[in-house]
Amino acid sequence: MREWVSITGHYVSYGQDAPEILDVSSPKGEVGKVANLSCSAAPEKAEIVWLYKGEAVKFDERIKVQTEERQLQKKDLDGNPQKYKMSNLSIANATSEDAGNYTCITQLGEAKIERVLVLDMSFPGKLVKKTPGPIRQNVTDQANVTMQCVFEVYKPGEVQWWKRAKENEVIDLETKPAVQLDLKQIESTYVLHIKSPEDNGTYICEVWDPVTSSNISGEIDVIVYAAPLVVIDTVIPISSTQLFLNWTIRSYNSPIKSYNLMYRRLPSTDYSLYTREKIGVKNISFVMEGLEKSTSYQLKLEVTTAYGQSKPHVYDTTVKTLDKDPIFVPNISINGFSATSVTIGWAPPPEDIAELIHYYLLEARKKDEVAPRRAYHSRDSRNLPYMFDNLEPHSTYLFRVCACSDFTKRCGNWSEEMKANTLGGTPGRPSNVTIQCSNGFMNLTWDPPLKLNAEIKAYSMNLSGIATYKDRYGRLQREPWGPMYRSKTNDTRSARFDDLPPNTNYTVRLSAVTRTQRRGEEETKRCSTPPAQPPAPRPRWIKIVEDDKYMLKLSLPRLSERNGPICCYRIYMMKLLPRSDWSKLPSPRDVSIVDYEEAHGVHPVLGAYIADAFSHDKFPLGADVIEMIMGDENVVFNTDDATLHSDMCRRCLKKPRRPYFDIPPPKTSVTTTPTTTTKDEFFDEEDLSTAEPEEIKRDRRSYPDFDRSDNDYTRNPMMVDSADDYITVKDGLLDPIANYTLFVEVIPGRAQDEAVYSEYVKVLMPAASASATAPPAPLELALLAMCSVAALVVLVMVVVCVVQTRRSRKLPPHAHVEMNPLQVALRYVVGSLGGRQQLISAVPPDMPPIAKEDLAAAYAERQADSDYGFQKEFEFQ
């Protein structure tokens, strides 16, 4: 133990009446060595006194004290170094008697202070040495054996000696004080006088250790050799030619070499050595054979060990062999049976031989099998039956029994076999069960159980399912399905379940059913139907006014993920061209995909552009619809959306496949003859060609075409990703004088599932709707009447011009046409009002192909017609 106080931190300048103990030290002592105790005090003028157990320490050659002054690291107020006094108490050749409490007293004048120090000299005890064993002695030597034990113990007590004999018998011998050998060791001895073989055993010395609170002991084996001793215990006749005998042997630590069994046949007095069979050295019983029936015998037995030979022991009672051999063959019967057990019984043996039968050997063998199942059943006066359990149900077993003897370790003849059938039990699991789930159905196949255990009449199926998905409010749902029960006859090996919902985990439990309607063990299999396409989205939008500005507000309901996970929604806006019929637009799946700039350029392109794209998780929490203003340049789309970047949903960021166009064939001019034409209001004047109209071939959305003859697959957009492959989302400002519609694309979670598209929403214009026509004012009525009169005059003039024109066409070709000034004026007015339009004949001329030799004449004819046409046009103007 060590007590420590900081010297530099606590000593400040004190007066002469204030001593202080700065530090004490009492390290653990060791017996036989020097023990030191120290005490430091201030001021240096203080006196230090040592006490032991309340009395002043007596100093001598072994116990000494040394005192010295030392300086502190601090100085007093005058700048002088401060000093303290240290006293060191040393005890040479310390013993346990020096352990205890020491007191350091510091005194200065009338003032004093003290501190207690504890000197600990203890140590754990141990056995240092003992008499080596085993000690071997012959009992005939009658020797004295001295046994010794040496311990190291702190403050030892008395040493106890005791003996552990055969079968762990404990015998106390003596307890006496030990002899102190030195400061730490003690010695104890015990003297054994060997008088008989019973002195053989293990002798133990033991002492209590107060430090560890345990006993320390040492063991010494003493082996005593003596002549062997054998005693015949029992001789029993077990047949007409056999005697059973057993004996007790004491070899006294010497190995047995042989037994000599001798017998005499009464009334003879001479013993004969039994030599028919040699007795084993480990035997304690034996069966003599080859004797005469109904004959009295007397036996004696002797044993020889390595030490010597024993005295022969004569069994004092004569024994007579039986008149006849005891034979007992059980006659078994079936007492009861169940699905897994059969109970058999038999009549008890006759009383005169019952004591010779000790147990029965029983066998149960399944029919058509070779390996039997064996059991041992003890015989007693109750003659209880025996039950074979853990048998297989619905099986046939054969049983037999024989009687056995412990004397001979042999059994008699087997009984006749008895047949018994176990009842039908619980069938085992169906084997080779397979399950396969596909779109909307499940196929189940199986084979009969490996362990039938009963006659099977049918198979029972229990199908149930559970679907885990997010509903239209974004809440996680666990929707159970079923259960559906179905039964199939015994000759059926498959079943099919139709109309199963998609995206559902199914569990089917299949079991065999016996004729008693007992169900067998269930075989459980699981599979899942694949996801299906979600239903088509149903967006709605309306026109709203906000801050005197017309806007289009979209409401998009959230789709339930019952059919499978949904990756994202993509919103496509479509600006309609002027005079275009939106009812004749291609389906949303086939519409061209353009950019916002293409749809709103100077020469706009008819097509849909992606105004927004977002994952299914972007819907407001707990809401079944998301609302957004189209054309406000705010989008829900987030390029950092982890869902969109997942492997399953990465195609949400890829551009849809755009339509591509084949190069149109070159236009060919067709020679026509001049015909009388009427103006068709559905033809533009600028379309003057009579060639076939250019056909625009539209295909499904696809990546830009590439040369398939090129072996460089890196140019294939399906093979690599580029910046152009990713979508451009822009919800730009809308044209207030244009009509718009939109549709929504929903991309499922599986890559093999195609996207689902909504229908087009109604066409809206982000501007005020046309107001109702107000009743006409009187001035408007007057103007309307004047316009009607003017229109009538113009109509009359047009009729006159038409009549004149038809009359002029009857003139011969190239005839000079003259018009009066009124006709010229009317011609000019009508031409100005009607505009310049191509005159197309009502019936196209029938123009056969022109032969090669007629090309020159045909060209001259058409050139003349062309010159005549220019002439008439010039004259009309």
Image (cartoon, helix red, strand yellow):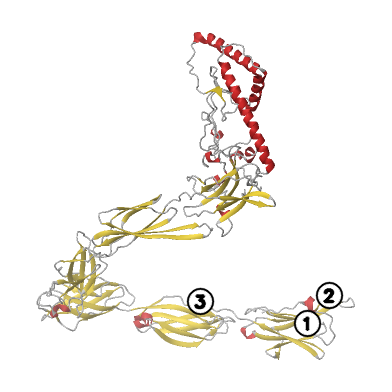
Of circles 1 and 3, which is in front? 1
In the displayed structure image, the side of residue 730 where residue 205 appears, left or right: left
Seen from the viewer's position, the closer of residues 315 and 650 is: 650
- Dot 1: what SS? strand
Local crowd size for mark 2, using a 10 Å CA cut-off: few (<14), some (14–19), many (≥20):
some
Instruction: Choose the circle earlier in sequence order: 1 or 3.
Output: 1
Question: In the drawing, what numbered circle is on residue 74?
Answer: 2
Q: Is residue 407 above or below residue 867?
A: below
- Dot 3: what SS? strand
Local crowd size for mark 3, using a 10 Å CA cut-off: few (<14), some (14–19), many (≥20):
few
Seen from the viewer's position, the closer of residues 365 and 462 is: 462
Estimate the spatial distance between the alpha carbons at disc 1 and disc 3, rounded to whole Å: 48 Å
Instruction: Choose the circle earlier in sequence order: 2 or 1.
Output: 1
Q: Residue 694's quadrant in the figure?
A: top right
In the displayed structure image, the side of residue 828 where residue 465 appears, left or right: left
Of circles 3 and 2, which is in front? 2
Estimate the spatial distance between the alpha carbons at disc 3 and disc 2, rounded to whole Å: 57 Å
- Dot 2: what SS? strand
Amino acid beneath label 2: Lys
Residue 334, position in %: x, y?
17, 71
Contact check, label 3 and label 2, Cβ < 8 Å: no
Question: In the drawing, what numbered circle is on residue 129?
Answer: 3
In the displayed structure image, the side of residue 469 where residue 164 appears, left or right: left
